[in-house]
Amino acid sequence: MHFIWILDCSYSMLGEKIGTLNYAIREAIPEMQSVAHDNASAQLLIRVLTFSSTAQWHQAAPVPVDDFTWQDIQVDGGTNLGAALSLVARELETPPMPQRALKPVLCLVSDGQPLDEWRDGLKAIDATPWGKKAVRVAIAIGADADRGVLQEFLGNPELPVLDANSPKQLAAAIRWASTAAVKAASQPVAGGAATKQLGPAFAPPKLQDHDDDDVW
């Protein structure tokens, strides 16, 4: 099973946002390892792609989750989401993806509005067999995030965008994405787009904040 983080590293993520994102993903790795151990018949492979003025692989080669070590990401430039999605689409072709595997998980985390033709990248993902089957998760960082873009990425109006308006919410969203999405991808699906067949069991919990939480 391939799990691909797609992470916004534009300048609008500067400061507490990028620091909290680094911390949240680092802390989620042991939980991902635990989920993988509970599904011993499946090998969980991690990759990380970042995007700002350009898109690039932060972790290019698929790494088994037990061998994965998080390396902090830094902010730089604008928000070229389309370039990132196009890079992901290339990896969802067959090859390099195998003919038979569990559904991949695509987790997009962003707080800004794309500056490029991002729908071209999304169409490229949708045009691949594995892109259609992928379990997709979208996390909107901050109240000013473009949730419409993230909803289109999900490809299913019944799937919610996870709102992360504070460090606590972001940490909860990352934990949910890195465990529940993996469990969902482990379930067999009889044809069609996986994200349209996940059903209520895939619905994330409501992420609540308290008045004394730090906010962006």
Image (cartoon, helix red, strand yellow):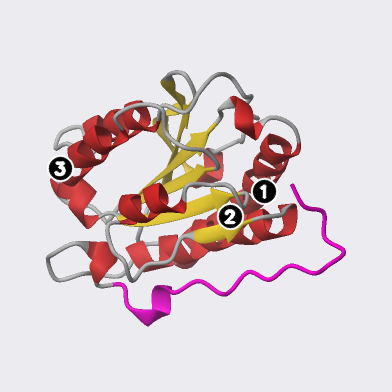
Q: Is residue 201 left or right of residue 88?
A: right
Which numbered circle lies on residue 136? none
Task: Measuring from the top left, give residue 12's x and y in whole percent.
Answer: 62, 31
Answer above or below: position of 214 versus 72: below
Q: Earlier in the sequence, mark 2 or mark 1?
A: 1
- Label 2 to label 3: alpha-carbon separation: 26 Å
Which numbered circle lies on residue 174? 2
**Number of marks in the rendered image:** 3
Answer above or below: position of 155 versus 3: below
Residue at image position (54%, 45%) is 66
Residue 73 on the magenta segment: no
Q: Residues within 10 Å of mark 1 (few under 14, many from 20)?
A: some
The span shown in magenta is 198-216
Task: Measuring from the top left, give residue 147's x and y in whole percent.
Answer: 46, 53
Q: Residues within 10 Å of mark 2 (few under 14, many from 20)?
A: many
Q: Secondary structure at mark 3?
A: loop
Going by the numbered disc 3, the residue's amino acid type is Thr
Task: Measuring from the top left, give residue 120's x and y in whole percent.
Answer: 22, 33
Dominant secondary structure of the magenta stretch? loop
Q: Earlier in the sequence, mark 3 or mark 1?
A: 1
Residue that label 3 marks: 128
When asked about the image quadrant of residue 21, the answer is: top right
54 and 2: which one is in front?
Answer: 54
Residue that label 1 marks: 24
When asked about the image quadrant of residue 173, the answer is: bottom right
- Label 3 to label 1: alpha-carbon separation: 30 Å
